[in-house]
Image: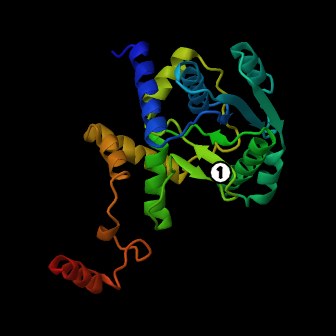
Amino acid sequence: MESIKQTTKKLQKATAQAIQQFTMIAEGDKIMVCLSGGKDSYTLLDMLMYFKKVAPISFDIIAVNLDQKQPNFPEEVLPNYLTNLQVDFKIIEKNTYKIVMDKTPEGKTTCSLCSRLRRGTLYEAAKDLGCNKLALGHHRNDILETFFLNFFFAGKMETMPPKFKNDAGNLVVLRPLSFCKESDIETYSNHQNFPIIPCNLCGSQENLQRKKVKQMITDWESEFPNRNAIMMNALQNVFPSHLLDQKLYDFDNLESNVYEKFSNIRE
């Protein structure tokens, strides 16, 4: 059985790969680490704290949690944990829970609206705190699941990019755990004994499409080991001319382009 030391090294290596491959962190960055109280965001914070110590560049991090005023939310858990960890942090209080419950029709899932409200609040917080970058705890499984959700249910080929700019263009959003396996994160989280805070707002909703896609991917990986790694490579190895999107490839002028190429060769 793999030791916790090996699992930690795997997570550090995968995080370093994402940071380097997508040029995530630069000298003087101030990164807001979004901390939800789940295993992914705790692991994200640990990884960035580690690289802050060992990286050849200097950057700052601040952990931020959004207290959405969910019922029975243990308000003391994160402040106590972060104080003991001796990391800069800020707790933002905003009753998005009431908004979500008021606006979501009965029987519908709350995840989409909750996510939009949370994202807008966190973007504003990053601006107020003087952060130029914001880090989220999405991992490899999240990226694959989102791809198939969009592919099967939204009719588009799209997923979570490891790095992007917000719509306003004043904040870079990072996903440093993009290459990390969820199973490794879970093993690491269990060993670290993180004070996990369950999401009573959306986590209690059953039969979500994401859960079905997650199970599908899990079954594939069980039947065909390393399938997830292959699919992750595929998302980095795209050939627009071998797809059907006219916005990505100029099918209309294909013949003239070919003619021009042959003309250039003759010349």
The vertical placement of 122 against 35, above or below, is: below
Q: Nearer the viewer, residue 132 or 48?
A: 132
Q: Which residue is mark 1?
A: 111
Query: Quarter holding the N terminus?
Result: top left
Task: Kindly indicate the quadrant of the structure image that contains residue 86.
Answer: top right
From the top left corner, tell me how far across and down residue 263 is, in percent: 20, 83
From the top left corner, tell me how far across and down residue 259 is, in percent: 23, 84
The vertical placement of 1 against 12, above or below, is: above
Residue at 66 percent across and 21 percent down: it is 195
Q: Is residue 263 left or right of residue 87?
A: left
Q: Amino acid at mark 1?
A: Cys
Which residue extends farthest front? 267
Q: Is residue 221 left or right of residue 169?
A: left
Q: Nearer the viewer, residue 82 or 78?
A: 82
Residue at 67 percent across and 50 percent down: it is 115
From the top left corner, tell me how far across and down residue 137 is, in percent: 57, 37
Q: Nearer the viewer, residue 236 or 212?
A: 236
Residue at 57 percent across and 18 percent down: it is 53
From the top left corner, tell me how far across and down residue 25 is, in percent: 56, 36
Q: Is residue 177 visible?
A: yes
The colour scheme of the drawn protein is rainbow
